Image: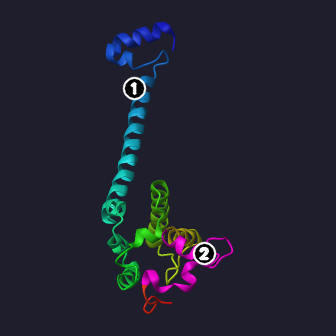
Amino acid sequence: MCEGCARARASRLGESDVMRMDAGGNKNKQNKGLKRSTGLVLLGSLIGVVAGIGAFTFFYAEGLSYMSSDSKVCVNCHIMQPQYDSWQKSSHHAVAGCADCHLPHGFVGKWLAKAENGYHHSVAFTLQNFQEPIRIKPKNSRILQATCLECHGDLVHAQTSVGREDSQQCVHCHRSVGHGDAVGLGR
């Protein structure tokens, strides 16, 4: 559109419409603003939905309880009830809880293990793709062995080669220490 035609058209349309049109007579500034605000609304909605689902899941799964070291937390998931019941009858019940044996004792290691296990447990239980009976994973088995040695290392060090890479795990001989008899655990 020529400059003269654009001026003539602008005088007919009024000043507010002229502000929204470019030299070609298009309403670019208005469309750009509308697209941007629509994008922001969609982005905000997406963030809100994700945050809402996350908050609901955290509340429903009693997520705050996992910040403690209370052994009752382990039975938030009904699948762990046999392990909890057998621990209550075990020789270590009065002196060690679940976290004492199954998590590193250092601050950073404990919270990293909690986060990693929490993620893997929530995925496994949500998707129902875990092995029954539940078996300890190799990484968690190493943590368990290290905590056994942290408490009992002086006692066993002089008697055996426990602690070396090629040595037998403590639970090989002392399987019932943490969870009592294996009866009823699917073993």
| Tag 1 secondary structure | helix
Q: Total of numbered circles in the picture?
A: 2
Q: Position of residue 6 (x, y in %)?
A: 45, 12
Amino acid type, mark 2:
Ala
Q: Which residue is mark 2?
A: 158
Taking the image as drawn, is residue 147 in sight? yes
Q: Is residue 68 above or below residue 187?
A: above
Q: Residue at x 43, y 83 (%)?
A: 179
Is disc 1 surrounded by few (<14), some (14 to 19) or many (20+) residues within 10 Å? few
Q: Position of residue 76 (x, y in %)?
A: 34, 72
The residue at the far top in this view is 4
How did the renderer colour the structure? rainbow
Amino acid type, mark 1:
Gln
Q: Position of residue 68 (x, y in %)?
A: 34, 62
> Could you say which quadrant of the image residue 167 lies in?
bottom right
| Tag 2 secondary structure | loop
Q: Please check the rendered image and state whether residue 166 is part of the magenta-colored stretch, yes or no.
A: yes
Q: Nearer the viewer, mark 2 or mark 1?
A: 2
Is disc 2 surrounded by few (<14), some (14 to 19) or many (20+) residues within 10 Å? few
Left or right side of 64 for 118 = right
Q: Earlier in the sequence, mark 2 or mark 1?
A: 1
Q: Which residues are magenta?
A: 151-179
The residue at the far right in this view is 166
Task: Kindly identify which numbered label has been placed on residue 30.
Answer: 1
Q: Position of residue 112 (x, y in %)?
A: 49, 57
147, 84: nearer the viewer:
147
Q: Please check the rendered image and state whether residue 99 is part of the magenta-colored stretch, yes or no.
A: no
In space, the residues marked 2 and 1 are separated at their CA atoms by 82 Å
> Could you say which quadrant of the image residue 183 lies in?
bottom left
82, 126: nearer the viewer:
82
Q: Is residue 134 above or below residue 39?
A: below
